[in-house]
Amino acid sequence: MANFWETKTLDDMTPAEWESLCDGCGKCCLGMVDDPDGGAELKHTNVACRLLDPDTCRCSSYEDRHRFVPDCVRLTPAKIDRLDWLPASCAYKRIARGAELEDWHPLVSGDPESVHKSGNSVRGRTVAEREVIHFADHIVDWLR
Ligand code: SF4
Ligand code: SF4
């Protein structure tokens, strides 16, 4: 039987399929800042959201996260193309653009650790929000 991510659009996925499509990279849970050089695009930092577990790269309170982080963006099929700050590797973005999932995606590999082992998650690369004074000191260029 064909895999759901190869046959369905984002709109057609069940809630469980939608959730499982997240590769667990944690890249969308890092802070962003205005470009210090005045550019129009926001810059990514390695500053982890207060709810991001730096080891699992998952939200530590996903179901009620908006109680603690009201501006956490709820992804929907309609929003994906407009969210320029999502990394190019994001599984939702790839499916929305007609691309295949990467080999390291847990759905493809069958291994939830493959996103980390392949170096495609933020594991070991973040700093805690409470330790940061100026987000602009933590701008990174490895987030793709
Ligand atoms: S960037 Fe995309 S695939 Fe990675 S954690 Fe965020 S929503 Fe999931
Ligand atoms: S609240 Fe959870 S899902 Fe939202 S950015 Fe923070 S860690 Fe990520």
Image: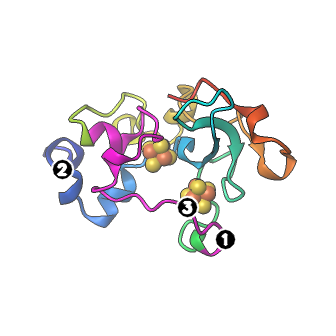
Q: Secondary structure at mark 2?
A: loop
Residue behind mark 3? 72
Q: What is the distance, in whole Å, between disc 1 and disc 2 at their CAs?
A: 31 Å
Q: Identify the residue shown where x is 67% and y is 36%.
A: 45
Examine the structure image and report whether residue 120 is included in the region drawn in magenta. Answer: no
Residue 124 sits in which quadrant?
Answer: top right
Tell me where residue 132 appears, x and y as whole percent: 83, 45
Tell me where residue 98 appears, x and y as whole percent: 20, 35
Q: Identify the residue shown where x is 64% and y is 61%.
A: 60
Judged by depth in the image, the label closer to the viewer, 1 or 2, is 1
Q: Is residue 117 above or below residue 52?
A: above
Q: What is the distance, in whole Å, between disc 3 and disc 2 at their CAs?
A: 24 Å
Q: Secondary structure at mark 1?
A: helix
Circles 3 and 2: CB distance less than 8 Å? no
* Mark 3 CB near ligand 2 (8 Å cut): yes
In-front residue for pair 76/124? 76
Tag 2: residue type? Thr
Q: Secondary structure at mark 3?
A: loop
Tag 1: residue type? Phe
* Mark 1 CB near ligand 2 (8 Å cut): yes
Residue 91 sits in which quadrant?
Answer: top left
